[in-house]
Image (cartoon, helix red, strand yellow):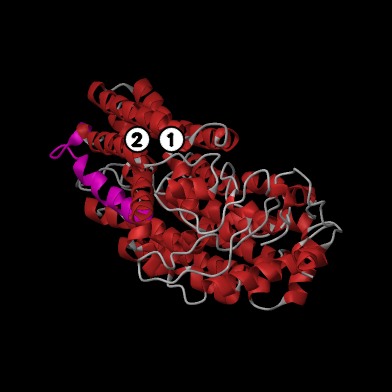
Amino acid sequence: MADKLATPFEHRDPSSTVNEDAYVAIRKSPKDDGTGLNEPRASTSWRASRRSTSRVRLSRLESMMHEEHAAALIPMPILYVTIAVALMGSFQFGWLLSQLNYRPFNVDCAKNPIPDKACIMFPGHSGNEWTMAVTAWIVGGAIGAMTSGYPADKFGRQRTLFLIAITMIIGGVLETVSSEIYLFSFGRVVSGIASGAAINVSNVLISEISPTQMRGMFSTGLQVGVAFGSLAVTTVHYFVGYGSGWRILVGFPIVLGIAQILLIPLTTKSPVWLVTHGQNDLALKELKRLYRPCNTEAILNAMIAAHEEEVKETEGVNAWAALFSKKYRKQLIIGMVLCSAQQLCGINAVMYYSSSIFFSAGVTDPRVGNTIVNVVRTTMILVAARIMDKFKRRTLLLSFMTLMAIASVGIIISLLVSSPILSVLATGLYVGAFCLSIGPMAWMVTGEIFPDFLHANSGAIGTMCTWVGNFLVGVFYPTISKDNSLGNYAFFIFVAFLIAYVIFIYFVVPETAHKTFDEIQKEFDIEPTHKDVDDEEAPKQDPWAS
């Protein structure tokens, strides 16, 4: 009976030598390890203990099935529609990320009279007020990211996307109608809440419905959506002109929000969420909408069995206590350092203030430099998706973060000698190296070093570190880059951070590529709690046992 529940398709011959890979919700728990926490009694399957991390973390739907069977799933058009609607949030994120990165918005605001075509937005505002407007979105993003989990779990992914779209519209309206910078900044906070929540909820929804052969492409879609959003808003900077043209720029998310609301009824609900809330009949219906005819009843049974196992294994486990226990302390430190490195390397000094950097280096029209940088970013994200699993994690991190440090020195030199060409080349090299290293890998490595039952909590800590780092860069870079501070040498701070992070990664961060979960845990002196099965005995094991 257990086989019938766990097998989404026809049961395979147990003697098959094909590598099996089925879903086990909780592979390891901190119980009974001297930390005062309890150990779950459920055992871990031979297959799951050897699950490779050479690819993106398994989606909840695909990981409940044999990999060959999951790869055979053929999506229906509604799957593409659902993912496209979800990715509208990432496009909005990229749009708001680079929205204010246009020098005429805030240049020469302190002059009296203000020159023509200067200080376009809220004439007369101070430098601190402009920094407030820029970083208000970051504050909102942190709030949205940290609080989006509850509505997504309580009301569902689809309804939460609807709430996010409404929030997006409210933020856009406040920004568009604002007559002073403080109301505009409040609108940026509201828009930030929508941005932070959209990335989290979209990521969860996409991971829950993506089949194995498309998971990497769709997961990369989030980053591509952000990059295209930044590229699009940079392009619009050429056309907004002066006067009140900026209101069109800040009002565009209203159009995105309305479009998303109109399209959400055409999307599907997450079968995984429906199963966790006991709506099994509706989950079956949604599975049939997502994929062409297959044994959806068996897939549903596998999902139900996996959910019941997860509930049983996590009962009585305090995930927060486990996360901060001695057992997972090193993993927690690595996760926090990598997530903070994603921001403190200086990437958002470029994304927020590159127009000023290019102008200082002698670029007559900073919009040209911004466009080149965003084209490079979009291209390198697509390249990263193809090479990420072909090289070791440490190799990519160490080599390209070192290249980021070198490129940062190039940015400094371009500012000192006022070289427009060097400025654009160095900045493009810096952004490209970021997309091939700490950009995608901060979350990838963090997801690989923690057991399943700690992913949500470790992700929350990582998100907090990311947004705090984002805020620090957004607030302090304008100050340290002033002539009465570090001026043209401001990027040396990021060079120092990058060197420190490279040293940390070299000595502390283990290699995780193409390793099983147990092999990674042994890097932290954590022995597997299940009984190992010799490779010779492996084919004798029931390939669907969990």
Q: Residue at x 35, y 29 (%)?
A: 402
**Does the image show residue 429?**
yes
Frontmost residue, 233 versus 517: 517
Identity, as a three-letter code, of the amino acid under mark 1: Arg
The x, y position of residue 432, in whole percent, is 46, 32
Q: What secondary structure predominates along the stretch shown in magenta?
A: helix
Quadrant where the N terminus lies? Answer: bottom right
Q: Is residue 76 left or right of residue 357?
A: right
Please, which residue is most extreme toward the right here?
A: 293
Q: Which region shows up in magenta?
A: 464-488
Q: Is residue 268 left or right of residue 292?
A: left
Quadrant where the C terminus lies? Answer: bottom right
Identity, as a three-letter code, of the amino acid under mark 2: Tyr
Residue 41's quadrant in the figure?
Answer: bottom right
Tell me whether the residue at label 2 lies in contact with that at label 1, contact meaning CB atoms closer than 8 angstroms: yes
Q: Residue at x 25, y 43 (%)?
A: 108
For residue 394, the mark is 1
For residue 506, the mark is 2
Residue 361's quadrant in the figure?
Answer: top left
Frontmost residue, 75 versus 36: 36
Frontmost residue, 535 versus 460: 535
Q: Residues within 10 Å of mark 1 (few under 14, many from 20)?
A: many
The x, y position of residue 427, in whole percent, is 38, 30
Q: Residue at x 54, y 53 (%)?
A: 90
